[in-house]
Image: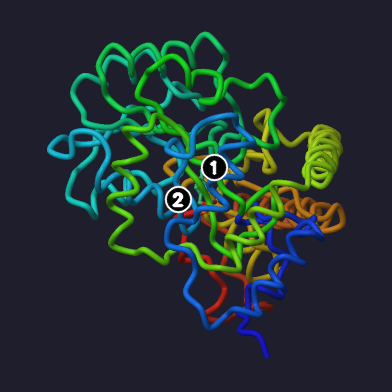
Amino acid sequence: MSPTSVADDLIRLHLSESPYGASASALTAAHSALDRISLYPDPARQQLIAAIAAAYGVADEQIAVGNGSDELVLLSSLAVGDVGRPGLVTAGTFPGYHTCLERTRRGSLSVPLDGTAINVPAFTDAMSRVGIAYVCNPHNPSGGALPREQFDGLVHAAASTGVPLVVDEAYLEFAPPDTPQVRDYLSSGAPLLALRTFSKAYGLASLRIGYAIGSAELVTQLRSAQETMPFSANRIAQAAAAAALADGDFIADVRAANAERRAWFTAELARRSRRHLPSVTNFVAVAVDDSASAERLLAREHGILVRDARRFCFPGFLRISLGEREHLRCCLDALQEIDDQSRSWLRLARRRGTPGRAPQRERTVVTGRGLDQGHAKH
Ligand SMILES: Cc1ncc(COP(=O)(O)O)c(C=O)c1O
């Protein structure tokens, strides 16, 4: 019996997981690797590193492989750049950078967003005051990507200050091919690191495998910190990831299916007059009046998990993964029901002259420790 949680059986639109599974060749490679399950994995992660380096046309020394990009965020905050100085982050983003900088006691400075977008001029102005800088592009949870000239500005600031710029590209596979990315700037000599993951487009979230690509000097710093956990990338994950990378057709199909799902979902949002932010990723930020209550009611009363973006200091939105079409339809219907109930309560309260919040409803469909709503780092 495989270990599961209550959340496994709900409609999962909260972690930007793939509804398309993993490539058949990745699964075959994972099964074959099970034959050697009693042996430790290759601590040098050589085969996978060589496969990634070949795919990018860079040297092996420019790649590090980790236990998901989560591990690489932690290792970068431990060991990359001037560790005596804090790290720079943007407000309203994936909280992993801030969490790791604080837990490693490096500390962080945060640059407020400009509306829902990264404020690149303010960010680059602050770079000379830090030892490392993190940007999430495409941005979680807005779903948007930086225009080329703004990306140029970030790279230029990294080059002129010498402060390493870490660009989290967890969702890049879903974006249009001309979306600016670290790969385009590797030959510039700027201190750059991109973080990539096999958890999203490649559908291998359970295996925990990701990689960094960038300047050899920064990758050496990452790898040296990794000596504390030489086996953090397990054998099955390394094998599956190498096979997944080689399956170009699979990833092309996922990209196309996701783009089609995104077009359908955003058209459906427009049809239902629901405001949302434009997305190049596999999730959409959907505007709601009360995101905390919408997240809670969707989970408890409808068994649908979504992410309240306020947990990422990005108020006013739910981040909804582009899961199965039927699940997305259920989610939008449920949101409509929640809105209708809350409006009718407000009308009733106004008529009675008792302003206030809608009462907590009695019906509780889903409860349980595995509900997963407390964990909001992703
Ligand atoms: C922006 C961003 N970075 C990193 C991660 C972590 O990915 P991984 O599963 O590779 O640890 C996530 C996961 O949701 C993410 O959204």
Circle 2 SS class: helix
Q: Which mark is residue 311?
A: 2
Q: Horizontal and vertical percent for residue 188?
A: 43, 14
Q: How busy is the neighbourhood of tag 1: few (under 14 within 10 Å), some, or many (20 plus)?
A: many
Local crowd size for mark 2, using a 10 Å CA cut-off: few (<14), some (14–19), many (≥20): many
- The amino acid type, in three-letter code, at marker 2 is Arg
As drawn, the residue found furthest toward the left would be 84
Nearest to N terminus: mark 1 or mark 2: 1
Q: Which residue is mark 1?
A: 196
Image quadrant assignment for residue 341: bottom right
Viewer-side label of 1, 2: 1
* Vertical relation: 279 (above or below) 123: below
Q: Is residue 4 left or right of residue 311?
A: right
How many numbered circles does the render carry? 2
Label 2 beta carbon within 8 A of ligand 1: no
The part of the image, by quadrant, that contains residue 304 is bottom right
Viewer-proximal residue among 103 and 163: 163
Q: Is residue 234 above or below residue 2?
A: above
How far is disc 1 from disc 2 in space, using C-alphas? 23 Å
Give the structural element (helix, strand or loop) at label 1. Answer: strand
Residue at (37% x, 18% y) in the render: 190
Q: Nearer the viewer, residue 36 or 108?
A: 36
Foreground of the two, 44 or 137: 44
